[in-house]
Image (cartoon, helix red, strand yellow):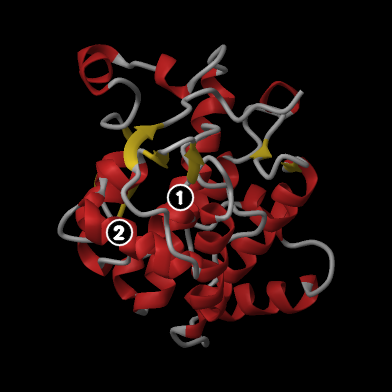
Amino acid sequence: MGNYPAVVRKRVFYGAGALLARLVVLLCLLGYATLSCANEHMAELNAGFDRWLAEYLVQNDDGINRLPYGRIPKDSLDAYVNAMAALEPSAMSQDEAFSYWVNLYNSLIIRLVLREQPASSIRQIKPGLTGLLAGGPWKQDQVVVEGKSLSFDDIEHGILRVQWREPRVHFVLNCASLGCPNLPAVSIKPAQLEQQLTEAAAAFLQHPRAIRLEQKTLVVNQIFNWFAEDFGRNETEVLDWIAQFKGQPLPAHASVRYEYDWALNRAP
């Protein structure tokens, strides 16, 4: 808490509950608070992220959430990311840490797009040879947490997918693309984690970019191909997982084609 930037306090601690938030910070600084201090800190940071999302996120009629990147200040998420990076997820509960990593990942993606302003796709951001080989910024270090430099791949594949083995994580992570599940309209919260994961999965699976039937072909989002092992041991089990979660059977004997739309989720 001693490294909590003044600019973050200024931007985050306003509106309802501001007095309580300042009291919590004071107790933390004076050393009187317990571990709940860190929890209150993250909750206030996420409240600030929620206000940011409420201001800028555009929930379109087509069911895809977008951001007007060109009209958002490029540094508007810097304070949030920096304050989140100063926390210690290793000291958090499982649900707190899961929520922490998802919110950090999503805010880092947004911050990168705001800084780089790619014309049509996040894949146009290719830092160095690593970016060229990876087809985008996935392996470039983005943040330092508890002394370790981390990339998007580190957070998604080295932390979230390995430590939790929760397939629904794919429906709350957003890669700034139209083919991706929606950027959540509010931050992921430990106390609401199960509900948010289930709602995000259900919303995505009801959208045609997740799965749809074209004549006799099932057009399935590449997420279920790239990360098939998270949903089943083979394609049949993956499709069964989708059908069970959707609550309706998929057409029998249909062929399968995978696709993904990497166009930027940019709002006008």
Q: Amino acid at mark 1?
A: Leu
Residue at x 57%, y 52% (from the top left corner): 5
Where disc 2 sits, the SS reads helix
Q: Is residue 23 above or below residue 107?
A: below
Mark 2 and mark 1 residues within 8 Å of each other at the beta carbon: yes
- Does residue 18 appear to the left or right of 31 in the view shown? right
Residue 240 visible (yes or no): yes
Q: Position of residue 97 (x, y in %)?
A: 38, 69
Q: Is residue 210 above or below residue 232?
A: above
- Does residue 223 appear to the left or right of 28 in the view shown? left
Few, some or many residues within 10 Å of mark 2 (<14, 14–19, 20+): many
Name the quadrant of the C terminus: top right
Quadrant of the rendered structure where residue 13 is?
Answer: bottom right
Q: Position of residue 10 (x, y in %)?
A: 73, 53
Distance Cα–Cα, label 2 vs label 1: 10 Å
Where disc 1 sits, the SS reads loop
Q: Amino acid at mark 2?
A: Leu
Q: Position of residue 32 (x, y in %)?
A: 52, 87
Q: Is residue 151 above or below residue 232?
A: above
Q: Nearer the viewer, residue 122 or 170?
A: 170
Q: Position of residue 62 (x, y in %)?
A: 72, 39
What residue would you read off at disc 1?
A: 173
Mark sitting on residue 160? 2
Q: Nearer the viewer, residue 64 or 95?
A: 64
Residue at x 41%, y 69% (from the top left corner): 244
Precedes in sequence: disc 2 or disc 1: 2
